[in-house]
Image: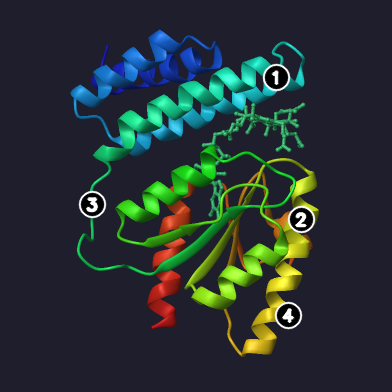
Amino acid sequence: MTEAEKAKRTATRLAQALADLQENEALQIVRQRMAAGDDPLQIIEECQAGMREVGERYAQRRYYLSGLIMAGDILRQIMDMVLPAVEQKFSGHSAGLVLLGTVQGDIHDLGKNLLMMLLRSYGFTVVDLGVDVPPEKFVEAARALKPHAIGMSGLITAAHASMRRTTEALRTMMAQDGVRIPILLGGQVDEQVCRFVGADYWSTDAMEGVRLCQKLVAVGE
Ligand code: B12
């Protein structure tokens, strides 16, 4: 077996172990790969594939809510192992300020937290409003902080309407205060959702979110 084939096989094993809720096996694979110096971002990407499969099984009623909870718990442990290894690229000065939150009605936060930790490891200052954040709270924080970007996360369908309400409230505040702050969406979103919400950008990839924020800060300065 070539090195590339071996790598692909262990990658599949990690996504599979997570999808099968095999906690010990998943953690063991990550431990071994971290010790072998594997790319932490690649590990995170494979975990996302495993989590998508968990979601599929839940939708097909092969898993119950307890399955989602277990998968979330395994992913949290994996993130704890992997994220400290993501290099501190720009230590010492802030690369920019980003305001983040999961919108009202939604409590999913693993993806948002991942984005937050990646942004921080790339030197950003992040203010995290948490989950189930009402539009007024986004507006209040954005008005006080004037961040370089505002990121909203949402994974359930109902989050789209919340994102739209929040965007409308933020646009009103920006018009009153004479500022223009880019609004980014993440989670279960796409181009159509972005248009419905009236946001500026969307991504389903935390690393792409970081690159986007870097570009926005560069443009804004
Ligand atoms: C784990 C999980 C849970 C956990 C969440 C734990 C936690 N602390 O977050 C728990 C058990 C709490 C949960 C609860 C529920 N869940 Co749930 N859950 C999932 C699951 C399996 C994985 C989500 C996840 O963490 N993925 C891994 C992370 C890393 O990926 P991510 O969130 O997409 O984030 C990535 C990117 O999107 C991006 N990103 C994320 N945010 C942002 C923000 C910005 C600005 C940017 C740029 C990028 C970005 O970065 C991340 C890394 O690249 C999904 C399945 C799926 N397909 O996603 C279902 C899923 C989202 N859940 C679902 C449902 C139905 C529920 C419940 C309603 C179940 C219930 N009956 O109570 C509740 C929701 C309650 C509520 N009001 O929010 C459905 C939603 C269906 C829908 N269309 O509405 C899904 C799709 C499962 C399914 N197929 O049915 N869930």
Residue at the image point whose x is 72% and y is 10% from the top: 62
Q: Quadrant of residue 193?
A: bottom right
Asked which secondary structure carries label 3, the reply is: loop
Instruction: Tell me which label, 1 or 3, sits earlier in the chain.
Output: 1
Q: Quadrant of residue 66?
A: top right
Of the residues shown, which amino acid type is indicated by label 4? Thr
Please tell me how crowded label 1 is: few (under 14), some (14-19), or many (20+) other residues with Cα within 10 Å: few
Asked which secondary structure carries label 1, the reply is: helix
Please tell me how crowded label 4 is: few (under 14), some (14-19), or many (20+) other residues with Cα within 10 Å: few
The way the protein has been coloured in the rendering is rainbow
Please tell me how crowded label 3 is: few (under 14), some (14-19), or many (20+) other residues with Cα within 10 Å: few
Q: Quadrant of the N terminus?
A: top left
Distance (Cα) linking label 2 and label 4: 15 Å
- Check disc 3 and report the residue beneath it: 88
Of the residues shown, which amino acid type is indicated by label 2? Ser
Q: Which mark is residue 65?
A: 1
Q: Which mark is residue 162?
A: 2
Residue at the image point whose x is 71% and y is 19% from the top: 58
Distance (Cα) linking label 2 and label 3: 34 Å
